[in-house]
Image (cartoon, rainbow, N blue to C red):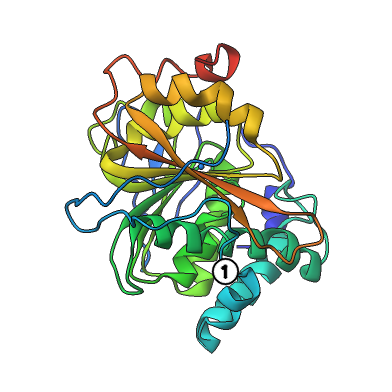
Amino acid sequence: IHPASFCRKKPKKKMHCYPWKSVITSPCVSHVLSLRHFTKHFQCAKSHTFRRTRFHSDTHTDVAVSTTTSCFKSLSSTQQNQIHLYVDTLLQWNQKMNLTATKEADEVMERHIEDSLAILPPIRTCYNLQSNEQISLIDVGSGAGLPGLVLAIACPDWRVTLLESINKRCVFLEHVVTVTGLTNVKVVRGRAESCGHDVMYREKFDVAIARAVAEMRVLAEYCLPLVRIGGLFVAAKGHDPKEEVENAENAVRMLGGSILQISPVDSHSPYGQRTTVICRKDHSTPQKYPREAGTPSKLPL
């Protein structure tokens, strides 16, 4: 598929976005594409055993976790090639679509790929994951596939769902999945407010993650309904999210979660230190959440 095919506007009423694939529809999701192949620092809670994994008891939130450079270097040559192929495809399509403000490959690697890989160590530390541990992860508001696609490449045993509401971005994501040969990714077109009430997605994921989507109160309402009890909601944030996290503490609790830890990330990106805010799902989210589409962002909890 060439990005030039999206130069012309398409009619809104009837979209034929995936002519080469069979499309499954559900009450809350317009199109489901086929499977192709984070007040101050909080101390991590004591060990608690869950269905497949347990939280680590020795997490220190005031210590930056391992570097993103080592994360990238630890990838196999095939995985590194997949990431470079993804970056090349992203920049090609970005000439015709608004996917990222970053225009150069080196800048994409520093600003986006490193930030995405930097999320892995805090998740592994808090979840005490082994390298081959299988988990299900949903990237809410995936956009250009950051960080979900990068995590899917780095962790081929993880089952990754990319949730995106904009049709053209879904087409791009599915194209990248095909080009990179990923077999552990599913692209879902829909809104988090709707998917949070769908039995196919509600409380079905071990980890829900979001990067550059919204503030913590809004993200909590988007993500926590999708996380199973005992799972994690991870928000990728900037240098100092202290005030934002404090404002979101009550919302997280209302939605069935608790703030587990704040992890500074030792990023080599020139754009400054990054932070991951990690929340644990303690009990089921009340059925009235998430509220109807648009309400969480207009009237945050």
Q: Which residue is mark 1?
A: 66
Q: Left or right of 110: which side holds 32?
A: left
Q: Secondary structure at mark 1?
A: loop
Residue 194, compared with residue 81, is above or below; it is above
16 or 231, which is in the foreground? 231
Percent x, y of residue 170: 53, 48
| One can see residue 301 in this view | yes
When the figure is inspected, residue 200 is found, relative to residue 181, above or below; the finding is above
**Which residue is depicted at the point 32% across and 36% down?**
281
Q: Place residue 240 in its image quadrant.
A: top right
- Whether 160 is drawn above or below 140: the answer is below
User: Which of these two is toward me, 5 or 213?
Assistant: 213
Q: Position of residue 21 (x, y in %)?
A: 39, 56
Q: Residue at x 79, y 56 (%)?
A: 95
What x and y, as percent, mark residue 62? 58, 52
Residue in the image at 48% along x and 25% along y: 249
Q: Position of residue 1 (x, y in %)?
A: 60, 62
Q: Quick check: 247 left or right of 37?
A: right
Circle 1 Cα neighbour tier, 10 Å, few/some/many (<14 / 14–19 / ≥20): some
Outermost residue toward the left?
A: 51
Report the amino acid beneath label 1: Ser
Is residue 12 visible in this depiction of the protein?
no
User: How many numbered markers are drawn?
Assistant: 1
Which residue is farthest top?
299
Identified at 39% across, 55% down, the residue is 126
